[in-house]
């Protein structure tokens, strides 16, 4: 692993450090942000609407952030992303008890922050890595992200448990703001690469790479899952079974330790030709472990889920990200069109998130409060499994071609 890290450029190392600081700030509050919002109304509606608002904001803001990246640079948008993430947590600190009345403001602030950050992040990954080393980079980045996740949740859990009322949450949110500021300072060491001022948006819409065109339905399906399952369902069911903030923090610390080991192994043995197989194993594992925890919400099931989920989730998300980046690179002119691909990616992904939230809200009519969480938690991951055949037909190898080449459907 150390040899892999040494092989990266100095700029890439600063990029990893910047994101490691950002990740630590995020994990300090990330797990508990959902619990904080849930405590404001003791239903899942506020969480769902928060997810809905930031999903809508991303669809509207991503194009504007892409325009800003052209006028300035992708790294400037990324730095502004850190600023607006900080503003998002300041909104929670300012309004605290009345935050439910300003949930739209919170959601749109978070959506803008995500748009600014991810425009810069996606372009940095494309510019600083190649298809051959991208899997290794993504896994190494995952390790650095996860190291902070080992300490952050349990530290936050202790702080929240030891302080009365919601005071612990406010202290944790302040800590998050501090690390976001440090991320901003570190980002000054990363220049990135300039991008063309000309937009190829409509050209990409009309004539994308063939692989990219087929990935639309995959990105849409991924949005359905990430908009609900990845946003708050995991946190809420683990919080319910673990039984409190401190227990949730300890659980997440253990899960992150497992994730570090899995990232190391995946980085060591990663290879583009194994992406689909890794994704398939991960998606089935997420689905089965989610069903187990839904049917048997006991400590043993939580432990099994805590072992399986970090490994499986990393396998799914990293493999899918690498496929998306490769689909962009299939376009011979991707270097000048890469920003447009990144902007367009958010359309099916964002629509999927919105559909996922509406599906969850609709489920409230058919399941009582006690059943809503376990039923939705077990149903949404099946979408990952259903995507396996689609990904196979997109990325299957040509029997006649050389290794690494792909056939049409």
Image (tube, rainbow, N blue to C red):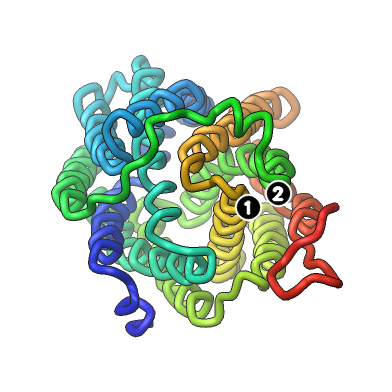
Residue 330 numbered tag: 1
Would you place residue 136 above or below residue 124 in this image?
A: below
x then y, percent, for residue 47: 48, 31
Would you place residue 43 above or below residue 247 in this image?
A: above
Closer to the camera in the image, 51 or 295: 51
Q: Can see residue 156? A: yes
Q: Residues within 10 Å of mark 2 (few under 14, many from 20)?
A: many
Closer to the camera in the image, 341 or 230: 341
In the image, taking residue 8 as reference, residue 260 lies left or right, namely right
x then y, percent, for residue 110: 36, 31
Q: Residues within 10 Å of mark 1 (few under 14, many from 20)?
A: some
Question: Considering only order in the chain, which callout, 1 or 2, is on the residue closer to the N terminus?
Answer: 2
In the image, taking residue 177 as reference, residue 136 lies left or right, namely right
x then y, percent, for residue 7: 34, 77
Circle 2 SS class: helix
| Residue drawn at x 55%, y 45% as measured from the top left | 333
Would you place residue 254 above or below residue 81 in this image?
A: below
x then y, percent, for residue 2: 33, 83
Residue 25 numbered tag: none
For the residues labelled 2 and 1, say whether their Cβ atoms are less than 8 Å apart.
Answer: yes
Q: Can see residue 357? A: no
| Residue drawn at x 64%, y 44% as measured from the top left | 222
Q: Which residue is tagged 2?
A: 211
Give the quarter of the image for residue 283. Answer: bottom right
- What's the CA distance linking mark 2 and mark 1? 7 Å
């Amino acid at each position: 692993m150390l040899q892999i890290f040494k092989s990266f450029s100095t700029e890439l190392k600063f990029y990893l450090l910047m994101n490691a600081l950002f990740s630590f700030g995020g994990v300090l509050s990330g797990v508990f942000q959902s619990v904080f919002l849930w405590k404001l109304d003791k239903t899942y509606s506020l969480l769902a609407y928060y997810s809905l608002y930031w999903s809508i904001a991303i669809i509207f803001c991503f194009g504007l952030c892409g325009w800003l990246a052209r006028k300035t640079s992708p790294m400037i948008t990324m730095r502004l992303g850190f600023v607006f993430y900080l503003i998002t947590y300041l909104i929670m600190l300012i309004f605290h008890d009345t935050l439910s009345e300003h949930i739209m403001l919170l959601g749109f602030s978070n959506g803008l922050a995500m748009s600014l950050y991810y425009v810069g992040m996606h372009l940095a990954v494309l510019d600083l890595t190649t298809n051959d080393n991208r899997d290794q980079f993504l896994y190494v980045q995952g390790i650095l992200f996860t190291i902070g996740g080992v300490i952050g949740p349990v530290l936050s859990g202790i702080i929240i448990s030891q302080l009365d009322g919601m005071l612990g949450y406010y202290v944790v949110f302040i800590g998050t703001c501090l690390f976001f500021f440090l991320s901003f300072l570190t980002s000054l060491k990363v220049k990135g690469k300039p991008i063309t001022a000309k937009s190829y948006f409509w050209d990409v819409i009309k004539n994308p790479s063939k692989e990219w065109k087929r990935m639309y339905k995959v990105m849409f399906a991924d949005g359905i899952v990430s908009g609900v399952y990845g946003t708050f369902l995991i946190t809420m069911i683990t919080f319910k079974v673990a039984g409190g903030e401190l227990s949730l923090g300890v659980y997440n610390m253990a899960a992150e330790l497992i994730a570090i080991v899995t990232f190391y192994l995946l980085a060591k043995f990663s290879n583009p030709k194994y992406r689909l197989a890794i994704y398939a194993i991960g998606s089935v594992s997420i689905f089965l472990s989610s069903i187990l925890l839904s049917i048997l919400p006991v400590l043993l099931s939580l432990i099994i889920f805590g072992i399986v989920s970090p490994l499986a989730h990393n396998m799914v998300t990293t493999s899918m990200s690498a496929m998306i980046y490769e689909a962009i690179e299939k376009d011979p002119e991707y270097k000048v069109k890469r920003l447009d691909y990144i902007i367009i990616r958010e359309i099916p992904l964002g629509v999927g998130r919105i559909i996922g939230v509406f599906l969850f809200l609709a489920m409230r009519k058919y399941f009582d409060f006690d059943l809503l969480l376990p039923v939705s938690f077990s149903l949404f991951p099946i979408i990952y499994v259903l995507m396996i055949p689609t990904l196979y037909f997109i990325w299957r190898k040509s029997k006649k071609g050389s290794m690494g080449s792909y056939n049409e459907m």
